[in-house]
Image (tube, rainbow, N blue to C red):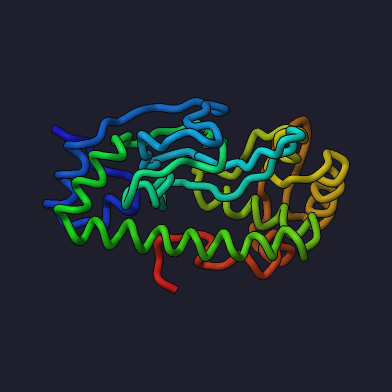
Amino acid sequence: MLSAPRNHLIENLSSEDRAALLAASTPMDFAVGQVFLEAGDEVTHIYFVETGIISAVGVMSDGRTVETYMVGREGVTNPAAAGAPSSTYSRLAAQAPGTARRIEAARLRALAEARPALRDMLAAYAAGLQSELEQSGACNALHRADQRFAKWLLRCHDRIDGDTLNLTQEYLASMLGSQRTTVNEAAQTLQKAGAITYSRGRITIIDRAALERVACECYNSRNREPSSPA
């Protein structure tokens, strides 16, 4: 018997479409730091995340990195590849350990072609993700580090169980595209605001409302759930 899906997109499918997708995919566990794709790779498999977080990370020629989007139980990686063969511009890696359902991209394209509701769901999610990427470009250019850090922590909090994240300054800097000193200053600002505690790579969210007050305007329902209608 197939286990009950924990991915929101799969949960929202009709029973027939859900059963077809579950039958065509396989469950898997992933560890923090696990790399699924490197920039330039063909997208051969797509992952419907159930628990944990998978991040797409832009990697520059000088080695600098910045997260471009994250996927948790609300979504799926590389949704555009469900419509046509494609390559990725980002490294795809696990930010927090978890579970997912893995399906061959070609097989998902065939399913989407035969099942219009599945095709429309994937297209809607991809469109929402594109809107989020466009907004992130402005956010990274215009908003303060503590605002962006607060937004990023809230988005992580939306996708995990519990209030604690184990993240080093180096890792946070690589996700935010900032210097470690900038990340440390932003973390201290949030700690002084009573939003988090931060020590030795361990962040605990103690007042979500305080974190939301610091976060920039880019944190909203579309950021939390890219698959949801505006």
Taking the spot 38% from the left edge, 41% from the top edge, the residue there is 50
Point out residue 210 in the picture as x, y percentages from the top left corner. 71, 62
Q: Is residue 170 left or right of residue 103?
A: right
Q: Does residue 3 appear in the picture of this structure?
A: yes
Point out residue 168 in the picture as x, y percentages from the top left corner. 73, 32
Taking the spot 50% from the left edge, 61% from the top edge, the residue there is 130
Tally of numbered tags: 0
Q: Quadrant of the N terminus?
A: top left
Q: Quadrant of the C terminus?
A: bottom left
Q: Quadrant of residue 39?
A: top right
Taking the spot 54% from the left edge, 33% from the top edge, the residue there is 93
Point out residue 141 in the picture as x, y percentages from the top left corner. 76, 61
Q: Does residue 96 appear in the picture of this structure?
A: no
Point out residue 158 in the picture as x, y percentages from the top left corner. 52, 53
Taking the spot 63% from the left edge, 45% from the top edge, the residue there is 67
Q: Quadrant of residue 217?
A: bottom right
Nearer-the-camera pick, 12 or 211: 12
Q: Is residue 69 left or right of residue 102?
A: right
